[in-house]
Image (cartoon, rainbow, N blue to C red):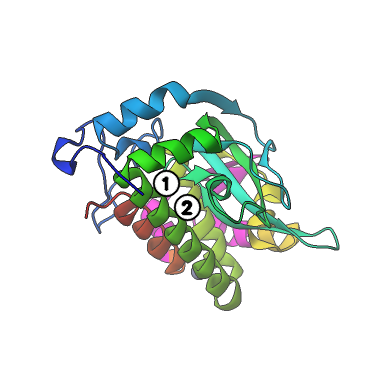
Amino acid sequence: MKHNDAPDAHAPARSPNGRPSGLPSPTPARENRLLAALSPLAYKRLLPHLKRKYFETGETLHEPYAPVERIYFVLSGVVSLRLFTANGGYIDIALVGNEGVIGIAGILLSNWPLFAAQVLIVGEALEISPQALQSALRRSRRLHDLLLNYTYLLSEQIGQGVACLRYHSNEQRMARHILEIRERVAANPYHLTHAEIATVFGRSRSLITGGAKALKSKGLIDYSPGEIKITDLEGLKAASCECYEAIIQKIYSQATFRS
Ligand SMILES: [Zn+2]
């Protein structure tokens, strides 16, 4: 594969490219961090192929067991990668915000994802066809590296989630999930129902409500139907398991690192 991307020294100063270990406050979710990490030349080449899309909560961006036809660089909001079981159950295996891209299977040999991509929190994305993205990849080593790296980080996020499901308490995971979404939406409060949270845990609404009650009784969050508000951010971080920091730090410090 031939790459003729501009050198990294010419990279734009329009966006922070990483997140230091101290996890400072999140970047306002109005641009995609992968696209922002491209050189001006690579970004300019992509622009004619990018189309802005608004998505609604519950909207499906791609189905399971079917080829991906459109790829989305998320600008704002949160999308869940959702795995369905044969008996009708489902669980969210990873979240994607403006640090990532939806439908990366569309440019791979194995374009037949087992999971669906469904919108958890309303937002925007820049969509592109797999063919146009493939063409851009052949011309930009930087874009190629960013997407390959992101795919790996996504696998780590899913792996961390498996350990979390096995070893961490409902309350810890509830705290982690609320914090993970906060990082991506940069809003407080944000709208999310208990039923939507339950999909991330694969557990019943009663257990989720129990976890939320425990966090509320400690003064860490407040909630009303459809809305969750963080009232003690540092306390909520302390109540979370280590998965929150592991996942968020990886995503924000290593998704756009420079080689
Ligand atoms: Zn955990």
Q: Calculate the distance from the C-alpha at mark 2 to the C-alpha at mark 1.
A: 5 Å
According to the picture, the residue beneath numbered tag 2 turns out to be 180
Which residue ends up furthest to the right in the rendered image?
Answer: 87
Residue depicted at x 62% and y 62%: 211
Residue depicted at x 65% and y 62%: 201
Q: Which quadrant of the view contains residue 114? A: bottom right
* 24 relative to 37, above or below: below
Residue depicted at x 25% and y 40%: 16
In front here: 92 or 112? 112
Beta carbon of the mark 1 residue lies under 8 A of ligand 1:
no
In front here: 166 or 45? 45
In front here: 33 or 234? 33
Q: Secondary structure at mark 1?
A: helix
Q: Are marks 2 and 1 in contact (CB under 8 Å)?
A: yes
Q: Which residues are magenta?
A: 211-238
According to the picture, the residue beneath numbered tag 1 turns out to be 183
Question: Quick one: label 2, few (<14), some, or many (20+) residues within 10 Å?
Answer: many
Residue 255, visible in the rendered structure:
yes
